[in-house]
Amino acid sequence: MRRDEARFRLKAYRRGHRGEWLAALALMAKGFRIVARRYRTKLGEIDLIARRGDLVLIVEVKARPTLIEAMDALSRESERRIEGAADLWLSRQRDFGRLSIRFDMVAVLPWRWPVHVENVFFGRN
């Protein structure tokens, strides 16, 4: 790997961490508790898992220049990976039967408070 490529990857990694931190802050301001960050499984990764009562948010965080670009960055393939990881996380919860799950996105945009988009996609039922 070239030095420039390594520098670019490090910068993207840091931007991702910062975006997830800002997204978590925005969700906590809405009364959610962050129960997991960067939850990794063989099937995929969930950026944030937040909970308020029996409502569980599976949150994809996108740091982009515009909201449209953030929305476009969520592909059907990544939705499937997120759903698979969410299924695994839910199966490990003792109160699984009571929980309502929602797939949301938080767009981290330059010089703005993060934008919380509810029901960015619907999981399979």
Image: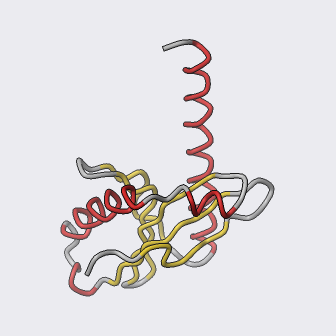
Residue at the spot 68% in from the left edge and 63% down from the top edge? 67
Q: Is residue 92 left or right of residue 54?
A: left
Give the farthest residue toward the top: 2
> Is residue 91 or residue 42 the one in the foreground?
42
Residue 24 in the image, given as x and y percentages of width and height: 56, 62
Residue at the spot 22% in from the left edge and 78% down from the top edge? 96
Q: How is the image coloured?
A: secondary structure
Q: Is residue 96 left or right of residue 68?
A: left
Question: Against 32, is 68 above or below?
Answer: above
Question: Against 28, is 24 above or below?
Answer: above
Residue 26 in the image, given as x and y percentages of width and height: 63, 67
Residue at the spot 32% in from the left edge and 49% down from the top edge? 40
Give the farthest residue toward the right: 111
Which of the 4 image quarters holds residue 75? bottom left
How many numbered discs, if any? 0
Residue 116 in the image, given as x and y percentages of width and height: 61, 71
Residue at the spot 26% in from the left edge and 50% down from the top edge? 41
Q: Is residue 44 left or right of residue 32?
A: left
Q: Is residue 26 left or right of residue 76?
A: right
Image quadrant containing the C terminus:
bottom left
Residue 89 in the image, given as x and y percentages of width and height: 26, 64
> Is residue 27 or residue 83 the one in the foreground?
83
> Is residue 117 or residue 100 the one in the foreground?
117
Question: Against 8, is 26 above or below?
Answer: below
